[in-house]
Amino acid sequence: MRSSRLQRVLSAPVVLLAFSFFAFMLPELQGVDQARATLLARSEEAEPDPETLAAISEELGLDDPLHVRYWNYLTDVAAGDFGNSNVSRTPVGPQVWRATIVSGTVVALAIGSAVVIASILGVVAAANRDRWPDRAITAASRVLVAIPIHVLTPLLVYAVALRLDLVPTGGWGGPEHLVLPVLALAIGPIALFSQVVRSEMIDTLEQPYIRTALAKGLRWRRVVWLHAARVSLVGVLTLGSLFIAGLLGGAVIAEVILGVPGLGRLLHTALTTSDVPMLQGGLLVAVAVGLAIGLLGDGLSAILSPPEREG
Amino acid sequence: MYKKFLPLRLLAVLIGLVLIAAACGGSDDDASDDDASDSASSAETEETEPEEAADDDGAAEEEATEAEDEAMEDEAGSILRVALQFGPDAGLAIESDDSSILVKAAIIEGLVKASATGEPEPSLAESWERVDDTTWEFALRPGVVFHDGSAFDAAAVETAIAYITGVASPPRSLGGLELSTEIVDDLTVRIITSDPDPILPLRLSSRSMSILAPAAYDSEPTAPIGTGPFALTDFTPPDSLTVERFDGYWGDAALLDGAVFRFVPDAGARAAAIRADEVDIAGGIDIPDLAAIDEDPDVDLIQFSLPRTASLYANTTSGPMANPTVRQAVSLALDNVAIADGLLEGQFAAARGYFGPENTWAPQAEVPADAVDQAASLLEGVDAEDRSLMIWTYASRPELADIATVAQAQLQEVGFDVEIEVGEYTPLEERVFAGEHDMFLGSRGYYFDIADAGALFTSDFTCEGGYNLNRFCDEEFDALVASMSAADAVEDRQALFAEAAEFLAERFVGFPLVHDQARYAARSDVQGLDIDPFEINLLTNQVSLGG
């Protein structure tokens, strides 16, 4: 197991390199002429005047062979320079950093609240197996897990912001702007995790040591919350760490709909304007964060799970 | 305004603590600090935002946010809140489309401005005269200062013209024209054109031809230091832009204290924001949101025709569309009214030519009552190969794929066999310019920043035109377009435009389908709002809140 974890750590730079190459090649794979795309992003419907395109190609360094451009990019990134945006001509690094902080805050709050709420719901459902709380939580989970985020987000805007008038409909600024994006990203995982916790809890409650604890006279509530729930949470914590990378994907939709200036919106804009440096910077950071969280999740699971630690 | 209640407050405090723990925050204020150091407008931004100094402390940040909210509520009559669809992409560079946002925010002005009918009117230049074929003399307005305190004079105009004509992609409005300047005195400047140009003043009304302070050109991208009634105080890409009243403005002082422009890409979010009273004006209202906004008694809809047409461009040099009979059959088979009123719910207008009916000179084609029958009978003598058509279009304008589907059905009804391919714009455009297409469905503005059709006829329909999607080439038409450069009277030019439009319609050079409309929503208390048909202006010194 340790060697497998070591392998994952060692393979992280290779994965990053592969993604950087993928991002670099994306316009080529799509058949997009970068000079033309940059001209259109700066000036909509501008004619493809050869002189103008040549000047932009020179400005962006597109006249160099592909391998030279990629090598230059790698050496710059190694030196901490992500380059300038093709469209705005401003440095990519600070923009990606700001967007990462925004998305990181939203995703961390979403996953954190999902783990906490789902754990409570899962334990309550398992402890009341086949009674109404279990049936209600299970039914709600099945419905909520099936709603895609591009449907869920406008529904939340309508219900929470427009009808209930509790939070702003979108934008970014104060803490109140976090509520809708966090809800949009958390509801799916809450629905899924609660069923995982429920299932694990039901298994745990049937273990001999739980029966022993009850036979020794420990109160049911104490056994459920302190002994069984703790064991059942290991699975959901691991699942939560795996889910973060997926949530970054969902964040693209939520951030665009809710006007949140995060990594998802940055990547969406970079893709639509074929802004390769911005796309590369954003993707590299997103993948790096995903890898780091995956490794962190592995470590957490190893700490919490005694058999794995011993193995 | 949303209600604040205790649990939300607690949540807000918790979230605030997490943000502090993150040690970086993510608020507008933080971001704008970084931007201040990155962007060309840093000096101005730092000078005008003393409240940002307190941002290091998270608690102070939260208090500042609340205070900001309260201030917004208290000063509801002084700060205009606007949500727009497209934000600045190019760092507010003057030569880019970002200049349109700077004009909408009333930050920058040009020597000349366009009237609501597209005529040139004095702005930073009080008057002008044509000295000879290639030379125009402009008398500059005295007493004008830029937002950085520097004086507006002939030297500033010279710097601005030299910059804008030297950039990699000069503004579309120049149409390849090169400009140079000659200073006569502090308030008189001559602009010399590379070729005789009868509409130079109109070209100078283009947004990218606005004049910035000389210091603005020292940075890349240019800093938005203009002469308008409002000055930039904060720019937080891609989120928002904030302006405040510039007390040194040469004209009437602005009625508002300032404005906040938010850039909200999602149409539903913009509609929700205006319904929730989070913004006073929202642009780009989508068709599905119109009904809800229309029912809101506190929100007014503002709709007007845009100089933009969705058209099927036909390859007139090779393939089936090179056959004029096939083109005529296509023209008769397409039912633009069904597309505009049925598919697009009346939010687009059926096109009867490339130029909409608001252009009084533009010919509007008649449609025969038995058009479909005529199309079918025309096709009877056409080979099966020439009846097989491919329509290419792109997904970035969502209405196009739907229009293509309806057009496909209409063409199939008269006997064509039609397929559709939807792809990315730039690869498709490359194939169109290579002449690989039958028909290309695209949406195109017909005025490039200025209300003069000459540029479109040149670029889109002449043999050497840079955007000739129809691949149309006719010496007679080229001569007609060339004669436009000698016509300086508006009536003469419009007569030539009408002749050119008629020429194209008679030869079925492409098929204009629908004209787009602008859809804005404004809350009822917004006063003095007068958005022009070219969507150039939005915030002006006359806009106010109240009533």
Image (spheres, coloured by chain):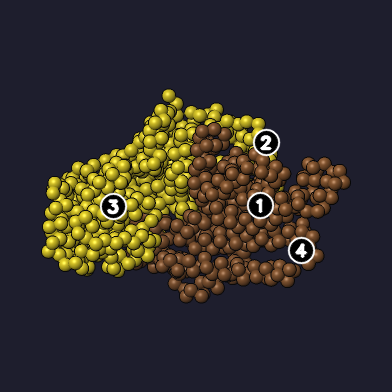
What residue lies at 57% left-to-right and 34% top-to-bottom?
A166
Q: Are marks 2 and 1 on the same chain?
A: no
- x then y, percent, for residue B294: 38, 33
Q: Are marks 4 and 3 on the same chain?
A: no
Judge depth for marks 4 and 3 and give the one in front: 4
Label 3 – label 2 distance at C-alpha: 53 Å
Circle 2 is placed at which residue position? B10
Q: Secondary structure at mark 3?
A: helix
Task: Kindly indicate which chain is depicted in yellow in the rendered structure.
Answer: B
**N-terminal-most mark, 3 or 2:** 2
- A26 relative to B268, above or below: below
How many labels, in total?
Answer: 4
Specify few, some or many for label 2: CA neighbours under 10 Å numbering under 14, 14-19, or 20 or more: few
- B123 relative to B378, above or below: above
Q: Are marks 1 and 3 on the same chain?
A: no
Front-most of A147 and B259?
Answer: A147
Circle 4 is placed at which residue position? A308
